[in-house]
Amino acid sequence: MEFKLIITLLSLAFAAFLVFKEIRRADKARLTWRLISSVLMVASFALLILPITYSVKKEEPAYEMNLLTPGVSIDSVSAIKGPKFDLDSSLFPSKRNLKINHIPDLAYFLKAHPEIKKVNVYGDGLEDAQLQALSNYQRSFHPSANPTGVIAANWPKKLNASEDLTVQGAYNNQTNQSVWLKLRGLGANLDSVEVMPNAKINFSLQTKPKQSGKAVYQLISLQKSDTLSADPIPFEVVKKQAIRVLILASFPDFEYKFIKKWLFENGYPVAFRSQISKNKFSTDFLNTKATNLNQINQSMLKNIDVVVIDDQELTSISSSDKAAIYGAVNNGMGLIVRVTNAKADGTKQSFGSYEVLPSTEKPAGLKSTDGFKFNSLPFTQTLFLKLAGNHQPIITDEPGKVVVNSQISGMGKILTSSISSTYQWQLGGKPADYGEFWSMLFAKSSRKKIENQSIEIQPQFPSVNEKLRIIVDLANQKLPKLTIDGTDISPRQNIELPFEWDGFYWPKRSGWANATINQESSSIYIYQKSDWLSVKSMLKQSKNFNFIKNQERKNWKSSKIEYSAEEEISKWWFLLLFLATSAFLWYELRVLANK
Amino acid sequence: MLKTEGRNWIERFRWKWIALYFAQIAFLSLAIAFILLIIIALCYPYTFEIWHLILAFSAVLICFVLLKPTWKINSADVAKYLNTKFVQLEESAELFLKPKSELTLLEQLQVEKINQHLPIPGSLNEAWKKLALCLAFLLITLGGVVLMDKYYWYEQVIEDIFPTPSKANQIKEVILPEIESCQLRIAPPSYTRRAERTQKQFTLKAETGAKISWSIKTNGSVKKLRIIFNDKNAWNLSTSDHLNWNFSRVISQSGFYQLELNGKKSDLYQMEVIPDFPVRIKITQPKPHTTIDIGQAARVILDVTLTDDYGISETYISATMASGKGEGVSFTEKKLNFGVEVNNKTNIKLNKLIDLKSLGMKPGDELYFFVQAKDNHGQSSRSDVYFVSIVDTTELMSMAGMTNGVNLVPEYFRSQRQIIIDTEKLLKEQGSLSPAEFKNRSNTLGIDQKLLRLRYGQFLGEESETEIGGDHEHEEGDRHEEEKFGDAQAIADKYSHKHDVAEDATFFEPEMKAQLKAVLAEMWTSELRLRTYKPQEALPFEYKALRLLKDLQQKSRAYVAKTTVKTSKLKLEKRLTGELDKITEPVQNATFEQKNRSIDDLKILLSVLENKKTGKSFSLGERQLLRDGEKQLIVLASSQPLSYLAALKSLRKISTSNVANLKDVESVQKAIQKLIGFEPLKPQAKVAGPDVNLYRSYFNHLKNAGR
C-alpha cells in the first residue's frame, strides 16, 4: 500500500511537472497532443510498476477433485479433466507439465476445502484409512488395467506331514511373449506352468514338501531368461495328526492284514479285533494300550477316531454294540464299512443297496471325485454302490459307477467301500495309490480334531510397516495374552462372537515372526513391501471398487460452478503505450519542433 | 709334379663334397625331426623334452646315412663325376689318378693340357646350393615350430581331439596352496583301445578299470601327503625327496577323493567312472513271431544292428528247431555265424538269410533263435528270442479237431477247406481245360468264397452295410407295406436308417471278433484273385483264412474237466455249539519303533538350512543334524559323485563358515530333497478351529429341540 501510494504520488508529481513544462514551452504547436502523451507516458510507466487486477466470473466442473494413485498410466493422466492431485510425490517425478498437485494428507486437504463434493480416484486405489476419509463424498473409481503378473494367489499356510502343497492363483500376461511360472523351493524347481501371451490363466502348482518345519518357497515368473517377479511362499509343515483306529473284522483277511501293518508302521494307534469263535476274539493292540474289546461301548469309542468294520461283522455284532457305534458316529466319530458281499442282509437300509454287474472286460481304473486317478487294480470290480439321496460319491470307477460313498450321520460320517482288495496296490509296488486311497477314506471319515486356538492374519500379505490385524479364536472365553515377537498386544473381544479376539500390530522387520497366545507359539510370516505387488494392487482395487459400489445412491448434481477470480492485465500493453508516447515526445522535440 | 697336384685337387674335392653332404643331411634331419615331433604331439598328449629331439634327429640322420652311403665315394667316382660336369677336363680326369709310370705319352700330354684348367672355379657350387636349400628348409621348420608353440600348443589340440564331455572338467578347482603342480596320467584298460592321457586337474573321468597315476609337486618340503578316497580309505603317497609325490591306483567305481597335506585337507575332487556296457543288439527284421504260409519262400531275412562302447569281439545266432508233435517233439540246436568278421568294431550292421529248408525244417516245425554277442571286455549279451514257424497244411486239412469236442461251426470250416481242395484240383486240371472253362470254374469258386464270407459276416453280426466287400442294396421300389397311420415309431423307422451296431450284435470277445474280421479280409482277397482268374495267387490267402479259422476254433474251446466232490451233509443244529471255555483269546501288543530316523532328521535339516538362509547361525543340535546329513551324503557321493559331490562340498562349506552362501545352501537342499525321495500320503485327521464349538452347540440344540 505504501509502495503504491509513493509510486502514485511520484507519478502525479512527475506528470504535473511535465505538464507544466509543456505549457511553458515557447513553441505552442501540438500542445494538446504533447500533454496527452506526457500524461499517458507517466501513467503507463506507473502501471508498469503497479499491476492492475480485475475480477472475472469463471466456470469449472463442480466440486471435483481427481486423485491419482499408484498404477495410473502416464498416458491416461493427460486425458483427465480438472485439477489433479496425488498423495505420493514420487509417483510422477519427471512429469511437471502434467500439473499434478501434491497433497500431503488427504483428510486435512478435504477439511480445508469444504467445497469439494466429489472425488474421482484413478489407479489402484486408496488405503483403508484414506478410504474412510472419503465416506462422506461422492466418489468414483477408475481402476487401472489389470497388471501383468500374479493377480491372485493362495496356499495353505500350515500343512501336515506328507500332504501336498498346492499353490493356486491367477496370472495375467499382457505381454506378447509367453511366461513361465515356476514353483521353486529348497534349491529345486518343483512345478511349473506356461502362460501364453496375452492370456489370463488360473494356475495350480503342486508339490510334496520334503522338509518338516518352516520354509519359504518361491513363485517365480520368467520370461525367457528375465525374472519378472519372485514372490515368497511361506508355509509350515507340522507333524501328522495321528488317527486312532479300531478295526472290527469278522475274520482276518489280507485287506485287514495290510491296513493293520500300514497303520502300524506309520505309527498310528490301532486296535484290531477279529472273531475266532462265538464270543471269542483275537485282539491286537498296536501303538496303543490294551483294553477289553469284547464289549464295545460309547466311552471306549470316545478315544477312537475311525472304526473300520466289514458288513458281515456289522450284522453279527450285538445290537448294543451296534447302538454304541452309531451313537459314537453321531457324536463325530467316523465309520468305514467294507462291503464284501452283496448278499449281506440287514445293512441295506442303512448303507444303501448294492448292485452286482456282469464282469467287464478289463479291470477298471478308479478315480476320486476330487480328481485323483488311481492306477488300476488287477481284478474286476463287480460290486458297486447305488447312490441314495444323502450319499456323496467319494471314489468311482472310470465310467462313474460308485465304489466308495459317504453319508452324514449326526456329526460323524459313514463311508461305505465296495473295494475288497486294495492291498493289491501294495503288492504291485504302488504304495502311493494305497496311501492315497486309505488316507482319503480316513481323512473323509475321521473325527475332527478341535484346536484350542486358531490364528488369522489380515491382510492376506502382511508387510513391513503396515498395520496387521491378528484374529484369535479361543476355545475358552478368557482374556488371552497375546505377544508378537515379544511385543504385547492388547486384545479386543468381538461383541457377537465371544471366543474371537483381535489385536493390531505394526511389524518392523520381514521374515518369520513369532506370535504367542497364552504361551503357545505359532509362526506368522511378514512380507516385504515389494512382495506380491500385483496381487496387492489387485486386492486394493477390488477393495476400492467395493467401497465405491457401496456408497449411498444420493442424487449428486454434477453441475458446473461459477466463481470469481482476479485477473491481471498484461504489462506488455503498458510498455507498448509507454514506448509509443515517449517516442512521440522525442520525435516531436527533435524533428517537428526544429522545422 | 703337375700330376700330383691334380690328384690332390681331386682328393680335396672329394673331402669337401662329403663334408658338405653331411652338413646338408644334418640340417635336413633336424628339420624332419621337428616335424615328426609335431606330428606326434598333434596325435597324442605329449610333453616336449630335449632328448626326444636328439633321438629323432639321430634316427633320421642314420636313415639318411644308411640310405645314401656318401662316405663310400672314392676318387674314381669323383673323377667320373667331374668328367660329366666339367667340359674343361675333356673326359680325362681319371688320368690324374693313374700312377705316372703307367701313363702313355698321349696321356701325359693330355694330363698336361687339362692341368692348366685346375683348379676349376666353382666346382662345389652345386653342393653349396643344396646346403643353402636345406638350411632354408630348417629355418622354415623352426619358424613353424615357434608359431605352433605360441598359438597352437598341444593341450589345445588334445581338447580338440578328445573333447571333454562333462562340465566337471571346466570346474575351477580349489587346490591347496602348497601344491605347485599336479599331473594325472590316466591309462585306460587295454580293451578300450584308448590312448593314455594326462591332465592337470584333479577332477577325473576315467573308464572302468583305468589306472590313474598322480604325480604331485609341492612347492616346499612336505612331511606327509595322503590321498583319501570316499572319506574312508587313506593312502600315503610315495616320495623320494618330499617334493615330488607319486601314487597310482586302478579305479573301478565312481567316488571322490581328497588330498591331505600334513594333516590339512584339500577340497573334494570328483572321480567318475565311465562304465563299459554290454553289446546292444537291435533286431530290425523279422518280427518276433513270423509265420510262413504255404506258398511263401521258406526263409527268413535277419537284420541286426550291434553297438558297443569299445568293440564287439564275437557274435553269432543261436537257433533251436523244434519238430514233431505232442510228446514226440525233438529239438536241435545250431550255432549260425554271420560270416562277417566283426573285428572289434563298435557299430556294425549285419544281415543273414536263414534258409529254413537247408536247416532241415519241414512244415509244422518251429524255429527259435536269438543273437548273442560278446564285447572285447568279455561281457556277453543276447537278444530276445524270435519265433519262426512253418504252417503245416496237412494239419489244417485233417478232420481231427472236428470229430470231438465242441463243434462250433463245422460246416463253414469244411467249406473253406473245400474251396482249397477245389482250387488245387482246378490248378491240376488247368492243362486239360479250355481257357473259358478254367475261367468259369475259377469264377464259380470265387462265388463260393463270397457266399462263405457272407455267412461268416453274419456270424460276426455284420449287416451288408458294414460287411467287407459287400454292397449296399436297399430296394426302394418294392415297398408295398401296409401304411400304418398314427404309429409314430413306424414313421420314424421309415425315415431313419436303422441298423444294429455290428460290434454289439454277438457276444464274442473283441479279440475273437478281430480275428474273425481278419479271416473275412483273407477271404475277400482270395475271392478277388479267384474272380480275376488267378487261382494260383488265391491259394495262399485261402490257406491263411483256413489257418486263422482253425486258430479261432481252438480258442473258442475252453474245457474244464468235471470233478465230483462228495461231502457229508452238515447238521445245522449242531453248528456253533462246541465248548469254547478252553479257548483262550489271543492278545498281541506291539509298539512300532522307528529305527531309522535318518529321513526325519533330513527333513528337519532342510528347514534348518532354510533358516540359515536368513543368516541365523546353527545351534548345537542343528550341528549334530548337519553331521548326520553329511554322513549320508558321503555314502551317496562315493557312489554317485556326479549328483552328490557338489552338495557334500557345499555342506562342508556351510558347516565351517559362519556366513552361508545362498547357492551352497540351495545345492545341499536340492541334494537332500533328492535323497529323501517320494513319500506316500499318510492319513491325517482334519483339524477344526475352536469356533466349531459354536456350531456344535447349535447342532445339539437343534437336535434336542427336535425331540
Image (cartoon, rainbow, N blue to C red):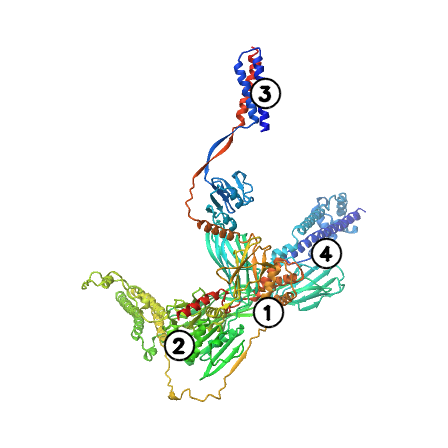
Q: Is residue B426 above or below residue A51?
A: below
Residue carrying label 3: A13
Residue B58 visible somewhere in the drawing: yes
Residue type marked 4: Ile
Residue B358 picture location, percent across and down = 44, 72
Nearest to the observer: residue B11 or residue B641: B641
| Residue occupying the point 22% across, 60% down | B476
Residue type marked 3: Ala
| Mark 3 → mark 4, Cα distance in angstroms | 116 Å
- Report if the CB atoms under discs 4 and 1 are less than 8 Å apart: no
| Mark 2 → mark 4, Cα distance in angstroms | 94 Å
Which comes before the other along the chain, label 4 or label 1? 4
Residue type marked 1: Ser
Residue A258 picture location, percent across and down = 49, 75
Residue carrying label 2: A341
Chain under callout 3? A
Circle 3 packing at 10 Å, graded few (<14), some (14-19), many (20+), is few
Which comes before the other along the chain, label 3 or label 2? 3
Circle 1 packing at 10 Å, graded few (<14), some (14-19), many (20+), is some
Residue carrying label 4: B50
Query: In terms of image quadrants, where is residue B535?
Result: bottom left
Residue carrying label 1: B598
- Report if the CB atoms under discs 3 and 2 are less than 8 Å apart: no
Residue type marked 2: Asn
Circle 4 packing at 10 Å, graded few (<14), some (14-19), many (20+), is few
Query: Could you tell whether B486 is left or right of B73 in the image?
Result: left
| Residue occupying the point 64% across, 54% down | B156
Residue B148 picture location, percent across and down = 66, 51
Query: Could you tell whether B92 is left or right of A194 in the image?
Result: right
Query: In terms of image quadrants, where is residue B179?
Result: bottom right
Chain under callout 4? B
| Mark 4 → mark 1, Cα distance in angstroms | 59 Å
